[in-house]
Amino acid sequence: MGKLPIVCGGERVGEAEAARERLYTCLDVRAPLRRGVWRAWAVGDAGEVLIGTLEPVNGQGAISRRFSKQALSQAGELSRVELRPIDTESRPEGAERRPEASARATEIPDAWRRPGQGQRLFRCARFQRQLRGARDALTRTDGERRRVALARDEDAPFPLPELFCLASAARIGAKDYWVFSFDRQGWPVL
């Protein structure tokens, strides 16, 4: 397969490696790191397929994924990789976040609550240790699922690298959060 151009906002920003390995196609995407959270999409003549969310690695946004022939079939013949921001405010790239009114910044919906003093957010001691000093956390229980929301800071590293692929970005009240879901036994779930 070779190389595919990486396009961001209509501008070419690099090349992705595309290689066939037996029954799979491996895509390796590396591009200059940009502010915010970005996803890579494989674009072809018949459609597109989500590659995934770029992870900061050595000053670049990077992701490597392996796809079956069937998984990539909806895109058709691949022509490029597109980078698109995940942004709950839909502001243009480079635009700064508006300061929130102080009253709105403290509001959180009723279902979410701040953990009590000394309350553990995770059963796993390793995750709990990684969150020492976390500025803003929320919890919520939905039936059999417990959710933990950690404040999203574009200038800080991802809070729990082991759970990177299981996090979802959400806006709760007036702030952006990473939300993690756990089952009754404390195992992470989608």
Image (cartoon, rainbow, N blue to C red):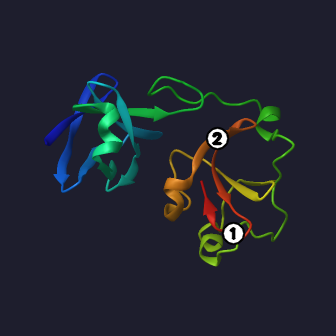
* Residue 137, horizontal then vertical, whole percent: 72, 55
Residue 130, position in %: x, y?
59, 69
Nearest the viewer among 48 and 70 is 70
- Rendered image: mark on residue 170: 2
- 130 is higher (above) or lower (below) than 53: below
Check residue 111 in the rendering and tell me which mark sits there, or answer none. none
Vertical side of 31 occupied by 55: above or below? below
Instruction: Report if residue 82 is visible in the image.
Output: no
Q: Secondary structure at mark 2?
A: strand
Circle 2: residue type: Ala
Instruction: Sort mark 2 into few (<14), some (14-19) or many (20+) by Cα contacts within 10 Å.
Output: some
Disc 1 on helix, strand or loop? loop
User: Where is residue 76 shown, x and y percent of the image?
Assistant: 27, 31
Residue occupying image coordinates x 19% and y 56%: 21
Give the residue drawn at x 62%, y 27%: 98
Left or right, 78 with respect to 49, comes to: left
Q: Is residue 63 left or right of residue 156?
A: left
CA separation in Å, label 2 and label 1 = 21 Å
Q: Is residue 86 left or right of residue 19?
A: right
Instruction: Judge from the rendering whether residue 168 lies leftward or rightward of residue 162; answer left or right.
Output: right
Q: Quadrant of residue 32?
A: top left
Q: Position of residue 96 (x, y in %)?
A: 53, 29
Kindly give the residue lying farthest to the left in the view shown: 2
Label 1 crowd bin: few (<14), some (14–19), many (20+), radius 10 Å:
few
Q: Which residue is at 42% across, 39% downward? A: 39
**First in sequence: mark 2 vs mark 1:** 2
Q: Residue type at mark 1?
A: Gly
Q: Quadrant of residue 186?
A: bottom right
Q: Nearer the viewer, mark 2 or mark 1?
A: 1
Residue nearest the observer in this picture, 74 or 100: 74
Q: Which residue is mark 1?
A: 186
Which of 133/141 is in front? Answer: 141
